Image: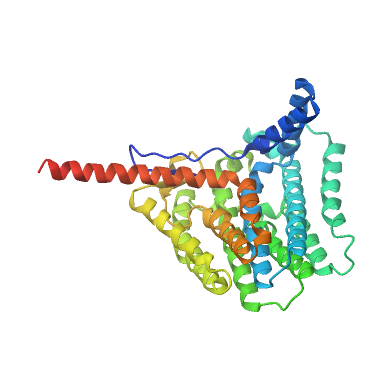
Amino acid sequence: MTCRGPPRAKWRRSKQFESGRDIFRDAASFHGQIFQRPAGEAVHIRGLAARALGLVRFGNWWTHKIPPLLLVVYVELIRRHAPLGASVAAICVLVFCVSCVAAYGHVVNDWCDIADDERAGKPNAMRDVRVVQRAALCVGLLLAGFVVLAPFSNAWPARIALAVNYLWPTLYSIPGVRLKERGLLGVLSDAAGSHITPTLFALAVAGFFVPGPANAVVFAALLLWATVLGIKGILYHMIADRANDETAGVDTFVATFDVSRLFAVLARYNLLVELPVSIVLTVVVAAFLPLAVAALVVYLALESTKYALGFEFAVSSDARLRRASVPFANEMFYTLWLPLAAAVQLALHSVWFAWLPFVHGLLFQQQIAVQIGDTRAVISQLKARFSHLRSRRIHR
């Protein structure tokens, strides 16, 4: 997805965090300095790490799927006044298990899409991987998610949610069932697998490590928020991949619609569905997460300014898939502003959580970099506008 400004102020978002190379480049370099590894071995380690992350398409899900789920856990930790030890355990279990599910889902999807991607001329991470290795990778990722929960005999709600979460991408991809090509079922199953069920898992994990009374209103607001994000995410993906699917002969939900018109309709979805739902969630959590209000106000101010300045939003290079950049056209409120606000709120609640905003920011630095770039583009365009107005007044 890209965001473009008006003429003379065009802004192009930074590339996706491809295969996690930056993190592993630093890690391998540090490892080599301490143990004085040969340079060739350090390069080899970096290559292996990059290939491993590429196989599970790390860049496709890390910055988009994990932060909204961390928000769910942060909200519950704040609400339940969780101690540091239980909080760290809940966060680590959530990130590890959801990462296993996300990696598994992408491996299974790529495996089942090899022939389709070849017809469409698309790269496929599983194409050059032997069948035995693909199967081993799937089984390993499946088992890894449950192994973490094995020591906890009473974590059955989390286990059930995790099992269902593994099931969704399987049903979405495998031949025979392949919900991907079953119209609206494909949209709903992907939304359930990418956001709805993981949100239930996050709530179950938080409830297991930090027992306490549930709040039905918070539960419903978080689940509704995850649902609207999941639906938007899969529709954006299907629209962006429409041309490849047509070439490959894959019929998804968007195949029966005029893609440019559907993409334009999603602007109404952004404003008439996502915006009200996000406001509702912010109001619901404001009592114990007041920084959520500040996050929403700042996000809306920035995105409204971009709209007023004529910035554009697109999901691909196709000129038909370009429209005005309205609030919630992007995912920044989900993936940056609200999760980071919750991390800061936790740090304000207790000095023991002072490290959390910094670690969160480091793990999701790509989103911060993109937001900084957006903000600079807005400031640059505002300066240009004010300069133009001033020159007009002088020449009058």
Q: Nearer the viewer, residue 103 or 211?
A: 211
- The reply, left or right, for residue 173 in relation to residue 138 is left
Q: Nearer the viewer, residue 72 or 237?
A: 72
The coloring applied to the image is rainbow
At x 75%, y 34%, the residue is 49
- The reply, left or right, for residue 160 in relation to residue 335 is right
Q: Residue 126's quadrant in the figure?
A: top right
At x 72%, y 33%, the residue is 50
Give the image location of residue 115, x and y in percent. Answer: 71, 37
- The reply, left or right, for residue 362 in relation to residue 396 is right
Give the image location of residue 383, x and y in percent. Answer: 31, 44
**Residue 175 seen in this snapshot:** no
Give the image location of residue 209, x and y in percent. Answer: 78, 67
**Residue 173 seen in this snapshot:** yes
Q: Nearer the viewer, residue 295 or 97?
A: 295
Q: Residue 167's quadrant in the figure?
A: bottom right
- Count up the numbered dots: 0
Give the image location of residue 9, x and y in percent. Answer: 36, 39
